[in-house]
Structure formats: C-alpha cells, structure tokens
Image (tube, rainbow, N blue to C red):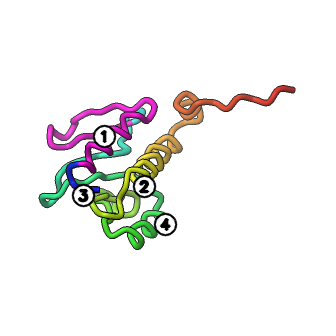
Amino acid sequence: MDSKTLQACAHRIALEMPFTEHCWPFGPEYDVFKVCGKIFMLTATARGRPVVNLKAEPQTALLNQQIYPSIEPGYHMNKKHWISVYAGEEIDESLLASLIQTSWDRVVDGLSRKEQQRLRPTRSQPAS
C-alpha cells in the first residue's frame, strides 16, 4: 500500500467501526479516532511519512514488527501498547483492517461491561 492510500484507507475503515468519533484534539495535523472518548487510532505525518498509530497487544505487536518491516513501535506513543504502520508493499487493506479492529477491540475491552454490551452487538440467545 502506498503512502497516499494508507491514511485514506485507515480513515475509511475506522469510520466503519461502531460508535467511532473522528476529531482533532491535537490540531488539524492529527486525525484522531475514538470510541467512548478513548483513542484507538491516530494518523499524522512523522518524519515526512504518513503514519497510522494503533493500539496493540504487546506480544502481537512485537511479532508484527518482526514480520512486517512497515510496522514499528508507536511513534510518540507507549512503545509497548502502540504500533505505527507506515506504507509498504506488505501492508494491504485486509491487514490494516485487522489491525484497526484489534485496536478498537482493545479499547472497548477496557470499558465497563455495561459499555461493552452497548457498543458490541449482542448475540442472539438460543431458543429454549
């Protein structure tokens, strides 16, 4: 995925996530995506390169950094819990969507049970 496509694709995918808020609390150069007031994605330009910052499970983040050269520790974020995704041949829409879904899920998992139930569709109960 090239640099121009990376952020546009990430924005589209993030806005498809339920209850997503798109805002600019750090200025117009930072696109911030939140669920329940908590950030799950931030896009900007870092060192002249478009970047997508996402929350990640620490062990999976390390593994992804070893597998994908375009995934690095979170730029200006907690390096253990955030990753930065840059444009690269190995980054495709499917991988980006999976990383964004994981980030959204990590934020929602940290919310109260009541909030989680409100944000995630409930599974229908089997008939008795």
Q: Which residue is mark 1?
A: 11
Residues marked 1 and 4 touching at CB (< 8 Å): no
Instruction: Find residue 115 and report its horizontal and vertical position in percent.
Output: 53, 31
Q: CA distance from mark 4 to mark 3?
A: 19 Å
Disc 2 residue type?
Answer: Leu
Provide the secondary structure element on which disc 2 rests: helix
Q: Name the mark nearer the viewer: 1 or 4.
A: 1
Instruction: Find residue 51 and report its horizontal and vertical position in percent.
Output: 24, 54
Looking at the rendering, the stretch of residues picked out in magenta corresponds to 5-34
- Of the image marks 3 and 2, the number of the one nearer the N terminus: 3
Q: CA distance from mark 1 to mark 3?
A: 20 Å
- Of the image marks 2 and 1, the number of the one nearer the N terminus: 1
Horizontally, residue 128 falls left or right of residue 53, namely right
Tell me the tag on residue 76.
3
Tell me the tag on residue 95.
2
Q: Looking at the rendering, which quadrant does residue 64 occupy?
A: bottom left
